[in-house]
Image (spheres, rainbow, N blue to C red):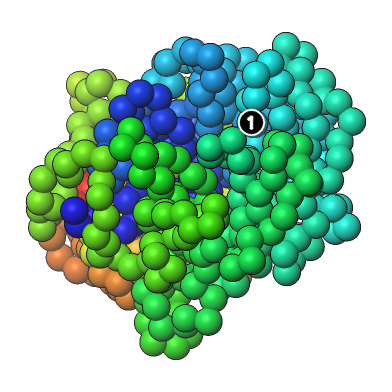
């Protein structure tokens, strides 16, 4: 059967997967965004339904002081003896921890903290023993392991299990069992063009592990013109028919040279076969955006040319919406009138700004919002495209010299400039039309400015995330006296 890659587009890096019965569950990294660790489920590995987040409470996910692309790093999702486990690292506050749930779409437990250095923890269960494997910040032994007491979070004595194939900064370990043999997947080569997946195996989950003679088992290094690059950070699963699958991150670059990506690192899927007891990804061929493989279930149907979602916020914020760090909840109200925003003194250049966004998941897309506002002088609310505090675009309504107007403002590194203005009434339709290389900003249906997508790309803006699109409000130095109401928000891709 045919399917398209990525299977979860937009900012969805570091995928981790497990199967329970006929259902697959998947989680990805979330960094400074709240709620954290988005969760998905699927019956066929290509149609993924968002079911919520593992970290939905401030005490689970303290993000105070988290810089852009910090906070929550790579999770591991596992199911053992009727319980789901999600282990990850808050690199800003607290380090490693795990949470549990009977139902991944429900509430998850309070964190159990694990005292160990590094990032990218993994859990593997063998009988009554839980093995905790992690990147240890030790160039001589980058991947270490220890037995974990699930009741207390205490670790036994750590020991090295992998010294690296080519890179002493090996990361993202996952231990998987197949037919009595234990496999270790590790990411090496950094998280950009040189990214790769290497494999090792052992007769015991604690090792010693021998490396695959054909390592790396997946990389697009040396393929600069491929649409998919930076493939790595992978996890394995098997379907009920015995077919194995690899989920992994990758990027879709555009432009001829230099090349850019602004949607973030995305989740891709490839079939895995086994030769001489070693995994072979996609028959050893590069992974493409159009794939042919024996999926465990039928796709839900032919993809339509337009995927359209309209939100009125009458029932609150859906699972696709996230804040940058822990929000001041008094600034966001949902109800039959829409989403009411109370802007604080912070602008989008600062942490703590009033902003809630959803991922940009396609190069060709459109976001539009109907905004009712009567701002005081200097106050502003509207629609923003955010990569981080130093790189974002916005089209918003403000008041200048007593007149209400829409402005298009670009923040690119140290430079900020208003590139378009238009007079508006009390209710305004704001929109962004995007293609691969250009954002077009529209006010009441009229284009007022354009901007290049490249300045929100990782290659320019840096970081581990992707573009988020959504409403914002600011008092530009003081708390807003007035409010702005987003009556509707539409996203089409």
Q: Where is residue 266 in the image (x, y as percent from the top left)?
A: 42, 55
Depth order, front residue of 351/175: 175
Res. 372 image quadrant: top left
Query: Quick one: which residue is furthest to the bottom in this view?
Result: 257
Q: Where is residue 48 in the image (x, y as percent from the top left)?
A: 30, 39
Classify residue 101 as left or right of residue 49.
Answer: right
> Where, quadrant-wise, is the C terminus in this rendering?
bottom left
Classify residue 69 as left or right of residue 299.
Answer: right
> Looking at the picture, does residue 403 appear above or below residue 417?
above
Badge count: 1
Q: Which secondary structure lies at badge 1?
A: strand
Depth order, front residue of 303/409: 303
Q: Position of residue 318 (x, y in %)?
A: 31, 29
Depth order, front residue of 474/261: 261
- Determine the residue positioned at 30% across, 23% down: 316
Q: Residues within 10 Å of mark 1 (few under 14, many from 20)?
A: many
- Determine the residue positioned at 35% across, 49% down: 8
Classify residue 299 as left or right of residue 244.
Answer: left
- Determine the residue positioned at 33% across, 68% down: 288
Classify residue 294 as left or right of residue 160.
Answer: left
Q: Where is residue 156 in the image (x, y as percent from the top left)?
A: 86, 26
> Looking at the picture, does residue 92 appear above or below residue 229?
above
Residue 93 appears in the picture as rendered: no
Residue 222 appears in the picture as rendered: yes
> Looking at the picture, does residue 452 appear above or below residue 160?
below
- Determine the residue positioned at 63% across, 41% down: 182
Instruction: Give the residue at mark 1.
Output: 124
């Amino acid at each position: 059967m045919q399917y398209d890659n990525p299977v979860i587009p937009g900012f969805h890096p570091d995928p981790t997967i497990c199967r329970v019965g006929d259902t697959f569950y998947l989680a990805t990294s979330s960094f400074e965004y709240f709620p954290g660790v988005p969760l998905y489920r699927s019956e066929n590995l290509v149609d993924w339904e968002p079911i919520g987040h593992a970290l939905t409470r401030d005490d689970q996910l303290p993000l105070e002081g988290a810089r852009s692309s910090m906070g929550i790093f790579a999770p591991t999702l596992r199911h053992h003896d009727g319980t789901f486990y999600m282990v990850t690292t808050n690199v800003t506050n607290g380090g490693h921890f795990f949470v549990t749930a009977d139902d991944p779409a429900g509430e998850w437990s309070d964190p159990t903290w694990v005292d160990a250095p590094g990032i990218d923890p993994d859990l593997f269960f063998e009988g009554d023993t839980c093995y905790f494997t992690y990147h240890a910040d030790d160039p001589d032994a980058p991947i270490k392991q220890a037995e974990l007491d699930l009741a207390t979070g205490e670790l036994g004595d750590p020991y090295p299990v992998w010294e690296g194939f080519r890179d002493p900064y090996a990361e993202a370990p996952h231990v998987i069992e197949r037919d009595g043999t234990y496999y270790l997947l590790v990411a090496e080569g950094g998280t950009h063009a040189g990214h790769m997946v290497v494999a090792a195996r052992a007769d015991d989950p604690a090792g010693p592990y021998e490396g695959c003679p054909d390592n790396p088992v997946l990389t697009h290094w040396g393929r600069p013109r491929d649409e998919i690059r930076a493939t790595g950070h992978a996890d394995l699963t098997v379907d009920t028919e015995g077919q194995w699958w690899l989920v992994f991150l990758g990027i879709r670059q555009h432009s001829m040279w230099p090349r850019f990506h602004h949607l973030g690192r995305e989740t891709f899927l490839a079939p895995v076969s086994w030769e001489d007891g070693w995994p072979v990804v996609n028959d050893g061929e590069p992974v493409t955006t159009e794939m042919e493989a024996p999926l465990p279930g039928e796709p839900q149907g032919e993809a339509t040319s337009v995927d359209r979602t309209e939100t009125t916020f009458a029932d609150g914020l859906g699972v696709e919406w996230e804040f940058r760090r822990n929000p001041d909840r008094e600034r966001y109200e949902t109800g039959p009138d829409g989403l009411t925003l109370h802007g604080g003194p912070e602008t989008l250049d600062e942490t703590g700004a009033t902003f809630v966004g959803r991922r940009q998941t396609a190069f060709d897309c459109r976001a539009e919002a109907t905004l009712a506002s009567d701002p005081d002088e200097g106050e502003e609310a509207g629609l923003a495209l955010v990569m981080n505090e130093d790189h974002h675009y916005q089209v918003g309504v403000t008041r200048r010299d007593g007149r209400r107007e829409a402005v298009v403002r670009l923040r690119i590194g140290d430079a900020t400039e208003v590139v378009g203005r238009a007079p508006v009434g009390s209710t305004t339709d704001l929109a962004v039309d995007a293609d691969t290389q250009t954002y077009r900003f529209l006010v009441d249906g009229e284009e007022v400015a354009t901007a290049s997508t490249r300045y929100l790309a990782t290659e320019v803006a840096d970081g581990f995330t992707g573009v988020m699109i959504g409403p914002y409000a600011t008092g530009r130095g003081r708390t807003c006296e007035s409010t702005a109401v987003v009556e509707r928000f539409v996203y089409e891709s």
